[in-house]
Amino acid sequence: MAKINSESIKKFKSKLQVKKPWDSIIIFVLNVLIAIPLFIILHQNLIDPNWPLHLDRILIFVVLVVIIQLILRLLKTVLIICIFFYLIALIYGSIFGKYGFNAVFEDYRAMVYAMADSPNPQDVIVSKLLPFPNKSKTLDAIDFNNPKVRNFALSATRKYFNEVKSNRKDRLLIQCFAVFKEIRNKWNYVNDPKGREYIAYASESLQHFSGDCDDHAILMAACIRAIGGTPRLIHTGGHLYPEMLVGNKADLETANYLIKEVLFVNESRGKEIHYHIDERGQIWLNLDYTAMYPGGPFMSEEILGALTLE
């Protein structure tokens, strides 16, 4: 009986093992997928000795590949079994419209890109702020429930980036970026009447897409809020501008990838993504009218107050 069981186990193990050369190919592909992000981490954190032709980096990559290859070889059988079930799950996700192969590819690409091209770490903690000027009037002016505001925001999401495939979470981010693009393209800066602070309702600004920084910030905040985003207004004393909530560091990586590789490629080429981190660790992206892309340079760094719409 024990002999029969032993033979059955051996047969079962032999069925699970993938025959060469497929096992070697699978392990090599997995090696590359693991080695690339690990190499980026090492490259960013190790001191550059300035060897000719970057031979030090080439040596690091080769050593890294060899070490990972040896480890994967030792764990070959377990890894192949796990990969088999993972592929089954991805096939199911692809067929039924959930998390499939395309989503994995986009996530991996976004992760590698974000690691190689990090946003500008402008970790300005917003805390102990001064009272927001004209707070009640500003809140009233952000009339995101107005049908005109809502309809304008919806039309922007149909006009820009509607063809970009995304999951549910990223879709909101992309739609908010479409609103930014539409307002940015239309906005015409006009000063307030001399000696008077005129605060225009968002629905009012839709008539001519003209006004000062306050009017722009109010319109942007209202439209972002109208489609489910979370905006806030920042005042710096002589300037007011809008920001939108991105989320955590992982969400920032996604936003960085979308802006620089998909949605605002030309506008953001060779430039940094600018953001603030609040006292709760949440990341807010700059949407000022002076920025050519979401996360463009700040017109003013000093923060005196913040007004958040949630």
Image (tube, grey):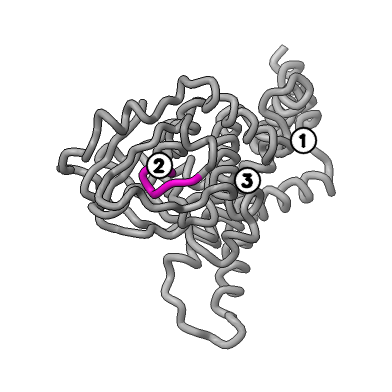
- The answer to if 105 sits in the magenta stretch is no
Question: What span is colored magenta in the figure?
Answer: 210-216
Q: Earlier in the sequence, mark 2 or mark 3?
A: 3
Which SS class for mark 1? Answer: loop
First in residue order: circle 3 vs circle 1: 1
Q: Nearer the viewer's eye, disc 2 or disc 3?
A: 2
Q: Nearer the viewer, residue 72 or 152?
A: 152
Q: Is residue 309 above or below residue 260?
A: above
Q: Which residue is mark 3?
A: 108
Identify the residue at image location x=69%, y=16%.
Answer: 2
Please rate how many residues cluster around mark 2, counting C-alpha atoms within 10 Å: few if below 14, some from 14 to 19, many from 20: many
SS for tag 3?
helix
Q: Residue furthest top?
A: 1
Q: Single out the mark in the foreground, 3 or 1.
A: 3
> What whole-number distance in Å separates the C-alpha atoms at marks 2 and 1?
66 Å
Specify the label residue 17 is tagged with: 1
- Whether residue 126 is visible here, answered yes or no, is yes
Name the mark on residue 215: 2
Given contact means CB atoms under 8 Å apart, are the residues at marks 3 and 1 in contact?
no
Which label's residue is closer to the chain start, 2 or 1?
1
Residue at horizontal 83%, vertical 41%? 19
Secondary structure beneath label 2: helix
Residue at x-position 59% and y-position 35%: 175
Verify whether residue 211 appears in magenta: yes
Up the image or down, 88 lies above or below 23; here it is above
Could you tell whether 237 is left or right of 272 in the image? left
